[in-house]
Amino acid sequence: MSLPRTSISPLLKAFNRTYSSNVAPTTKLFIDGKFQESQTTEWIDLHDPATNELVTKVPKTTQAEMQAAVESSRKAYESWKDTTVLTRQQLMLKFQAVIRRDIKKLAENITKEQGKTLVDAEGDVFRGLQVVEHSCAAGTLLQGESLNNIAKDVDCVSYKLPLGVVAGICPFNFPAMIPLWMAPLALIAGNTCIIKPSERDPGATMLLMELLNEVGCPPGVVNIIHGSHDAVNFICDSPDIKAISFVGSTNAGKYIYSRASATGKRVQSNMGAKNHAIVLPDANKDMAIDHLLGAAFGAAGQRCMAISVAILVGDAKSWIPEIVERSKRLKVSAGYEPGADIGPVISPQAKSKIVDLITSGIKQGAKCVLDGRNIKVEKYPKGNFVGPTILTEVQTDFECYQEEIFGPVLSVMFADTLDDAIEIINKNPYGNGAAIFTTNGSHARQFVNEVDAGQVGVNVPIPVPLPMFSFTGSRGSFYGDLHFYGKQGLNFYTQTKTITSLWRKGQAVSRPSVSMPVH
Ligand code: NAD
């Protein structure tokens, strides 16, 4: 996917003026098709990560408001489940058109609230848009199975039917893509949906709701609540919510998975990661280094599929100086500055965690060949910036290896053979993604067959599948059975009803049969 570089737009300038006034606007709830001010007394301040100026105040939704959202979803479900597949498909066709029209507006909001560069923010929207586009094929995606004459005069069909009210709990790092992994497929299957965006950047979700209203989505089909732990607990415990899609950190994911499944809910939980790339000395050097750095430092390392560990095999070790040189060329600045490559991280707390993990790596014996801890971005002295950082000679027992750093830090390890490198990956508890750079087909094949990760790239550093497949993180990166989007996503949001019918001409029964029917 290549998108044009975007410069700061007049719209964003206006946006900046509005938000630097003394009174920050509040983020609204979206209940029953209306944007409403929350009656809460508890608010979460949301700051621009590049300046730490207040952007908006996000409500911790009250219990009564959350209950109203569930009631609205329940009521809407009664009619939404009976709409035709064509109606739902048409809604998605219109939805994708307005998202495409407003992609820059959505991206500007993401950059302001989340910090990533404008071009990267457009990619965030674009990858969600692809799921909306895919869901336009509802008529095919929702088809069940059928078999005529499976026994004498007996036919069997199965339907994919909705579950009811479903919910999504989202992380901060993809404010548009991840709600769009959830709502479109839930809706085309006939469910209604409650989304809790990340309290750290709910703006993109709110803009998406404006678009859903514009294209005529009936009130209550999607409701938005905000907050953190209380909202999550409410969703886990509500008897009216039948399934939960969660994306976020491992601690929260494990907690939500166990609390919600204890109440009988279906849960899919995408969690943290530590993604490795193996670089073999036979790789195309230019391509491998560029891809590696893009995947390590893009979005300031705050992607669940970021490459955070590079294992250089054999002579590839000698590429370190060039890896460092090219990393130095990346421009660190506010995401809305033209030419910025790496924006700020989400919060001052995230920055200190990243800096502490780098420091701990050095204390445990890593060599810091590029140090971004003290970077100064002149125009944005208050921003949460961390420059690209490279630690070499990292060992598996270092804290910086065992923790998900979630910042622009590449840990480099060395291995003598491909076998050794694969062994390192397979011993890591996470299984989101892994990649190899090589020009040797048999090495690539060995890697694909032996590596224990759910999403594998061969000369592709961030192998996030397109929506016709599913996002298949494994091991410590995923709890559940059915994955997000693709066929599995649709199965997650549906239940199967199987109908067996017997229609026999002139059927004559002499006496009742009490033995097990074997057709
Ligand atoms: P987070 O877990 O802090 O927040 C995610 C959601 O859970 C938010 O809506 C938040 O309100 C809620 N939450 C946070 N802590 C909670 C707790 N203790 N109990 C209950 N709810 C809680 O995650 P984040 O920092 O917003 O996102 C970054 C994390 O998400 C990283 O670990 C990243 O790897 C992961 N992630 C994973 C994927 C994937 O597909 N595997 C995709 C994106 C992000």
Image: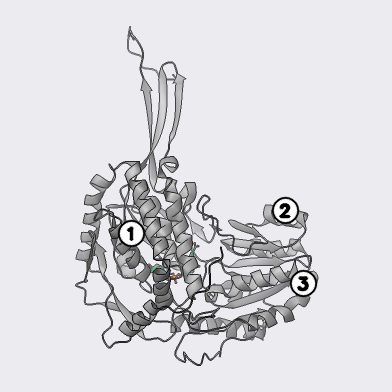
Q: Which residue is mark 1?
A: 236
Looking at mark 1, is its residue's CB closer than 8 Å to ligand 1?
A: no
Mark 1 belongs to which amino acid? Cys
Residue at 64% over, 84% down = 328
- Label 2: few (<14), some (14–19) or many (≥20) C-alpha neighbours in 10 Å: few
Q: Secondary structure at mark 1?
A: helix
Quarter of the image for residue 491 reads top left
Q: Is residue 437 left or right of residue 389?
A: right
Which mark identifies residue 316?
3
Q: Is residue 322 left or right of residue 246?
A: right
Mark 2 belongs to which amino acid? Arg
Identify which residue, 251 or 13, lies in the foreground: 13
The answer, for residue 287, to whether it is visible in the render is yes
Q: Is residue 151 left or right of residue 81?
A: right
**Where's the C terminus, which quadrant?**
top left
Q: Is residue 73 above or below residue 423?
A: above
Report how far apart the C-alphas of labels 2 and 3 lie in the structure.
19 Å
Q: Are marks 3 and 1 in contact (CB under 8 Å)?
A: no
Question: Viewer-nearest of labels 3 and 1?
Answer: 3
Residue at 47% over, 92% down = 381
Residue 217: give x, y in percent of width and height.
Answer: 28, 54
Q: Secondary structure at mark 3?
A: helix
Judged from the image, the quadrant occupied by ligand 1 is bottom left
Q: Which residue is mark 2?
A: 445
Looking at mark 2, is its residue's CB closer than 8 Å to ligand 1?
A: no
Identify which residue, 436 or 10, lies in the foreground: 10
Mark 3 belongs to which amino acid? Ala
